[in-house]
Each structure stands twice: as C-alpha cells, then as structure tokens.
Amino acid sequence: MQKNILVIGGGSSIGKEVISLIQKAGDNPIITSRSEMAIQNGDFFQLDPNEDLSQLDALPESIDGLLYCPGSISLKSLQRMDISDIQEDMRINFEGAFNIVKKVLPNLKKDDGASVVFISSVAATSGMTFHTSISASKSALEGFARSLAAELAPRVAVNCVAPSLTDTPLAANLLSDEKRIKASEERHPLNAIGNPKALAGVIYGLLSAKENWITGQTISVDGGLSTLR
C-alpha cells in the first residue's frame, strides 16, 4: 500500500536524496520548503516550520512517515557568540521540529501509526571545539525525540540520525578547498566525509522503523568519529 511521507525541508541535499528514494519506492512524498521547489511526483507546501502551518491542514488524514531536515552549522568561540546565535540554532533545529510534530500528530497516530526521523549531529554527544551552539540545539532535539518515543509508543516510532560532516551546501565553508577536505577526511576513522546519498539510505530505512521494531534510538552515521580513536 502506498505510504504518505512528509519531508520537512525537502530542498536540502539530504532531503532531495530521501525524496528520490521515496519516489522510487512508489510512495507519496509530501514536501515542504521555505523556498519554491519544482515537484514532479508528490505534493508541495512552501512554509517555514516556525511560522504559519495552516497549509498542513490539507495533509492526508494519515501520515506514515515524517522526516525533519532543517539544520544549521554555526561554529563560533564562546567569546564571539551571542545568545541570539543559540536562540537561532534552537529555533531551526528544535523549535521547528516541535511545531511540526505538534501540528501533524493526529495524522501520525492514524491507521497503523507512523515513523518519525530527526537529523541530529555527532556534536550532540561528542565535545567539539566551537560547536557549543549546535551541540546545545541538537542535544535538545535528541532529548525531545527520546521522550517523544516513550510518549507515543506503540503508535509512533521516533528516532534520530546523527551524521558527522557531510558534503552538502550547508557545509560548503568547511570544505572550500582540497586541503580542508583532506583534513576533514583524516579526522574520521573511515577516512572520508559524509555522503548525502549514503545518509539518505539510512534515513529512508528509519522511515519504516515502526515495522522494524526500532524506536527511541540515535543512529550514528559519522565514519566512526564518535566512538573510535
């Protein structure tokens, strides 16, 4: 049976790769982005997760999967950081996720329930220089996901994927030349940075987490950075 899968932030590199997998499987992607997108197969809503979400009233009655893609990479020393930097990272990474889940919760709980996936970061559990703001916001997201998984069981499974540095436009400043790319690769035990297609494959699998008996987990997709030395 065709699934309805809601992708928030579908304009991101990772979001686009997941959408491609959804379409190849013959399921129905419902995509949102703050910018206009041309969608050939699926439905599209232009919206910001922290603003008016009334367009989502038009969603199908039952949503089988939800992926929240918006994220940020804000790297500053504490001396250069303002409270507004942390507030902005919290707004993008945590508050938007809260707003979306609260809005579509009735849809997620319909029929056989649903699987929800959030994108966290290796920085949520590994101390990394200049990552205090992103670590705080992604840690909030992971804590939210675990508690939500307990609250919504057994109807809805909730999990996170925690990547390390991935080759996306969001990370362009960190991968601006061959020297930086090589240094980033060498920091990871698998001697490579993240690939959006590989990450999308893990995320897509978790969009069936409820059927596969997985909830309340954070899956590290980080080349071994968080656990190996």
Image (cartoon, helix red, strand yellow):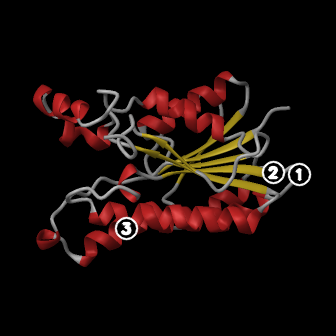
Farthest-out residue, top: 24
Name the quadrant containing residue 102: bottom right
Asked if residue 38 shows in the view, the reply is: no
Which residue does the image show at 26% across and 57% down from the upper left?
A: 74
Residue pointed to by mark 1: 111
Which residue does the image show at 48% across and 34% down from the upper left?
A: 199
For badge 1, the amino acid type reads Asp
Farthest-out residue, right: 111
User: In the rendered structure, which disc, 1 or 2, sits on the residue that comes first in sequence?
Assistant: 2
Residue pointed to by mark 2: 62
Name the quadrant containing residue 228: top left
User: In the rendered structure, which disc, 3 or 2, sits on the residue that comes first in sequence?
Assistant: 2
For the residue labelled by badge 1, is the local secondary structure a helix, a strand or a loop?
Answer: loop
Q: Position of residue 119 (x, y in %)?
A: 49, 49
Q: Position of residue 120 (x, y in %)?
A: 46, 53
Marks 3/2: CA–CA distance: 33 Å
* Number of the front mark, 3 or 1: 3
Bin the neighbour count of mark 1 within 10 Å (Cα to Cα): few under 14, some 14-19, many 20 and up: few
Marks 1/2: CA–CA distance: 7 Å
Q: Are marks 1 and 2 in contact (CB under 8 Å)?
A: yes
For badge 2, the amino acid type reads Ser
Residues 42 and 109: in front is 109
> Residue 136 got which mark?
3
Q: Is residue 9 above or below residue 189?
A: below
User: In the rendered structure, which disc, 3 or 1, sits on the residue that comes first in sequence?
Assistant: 1
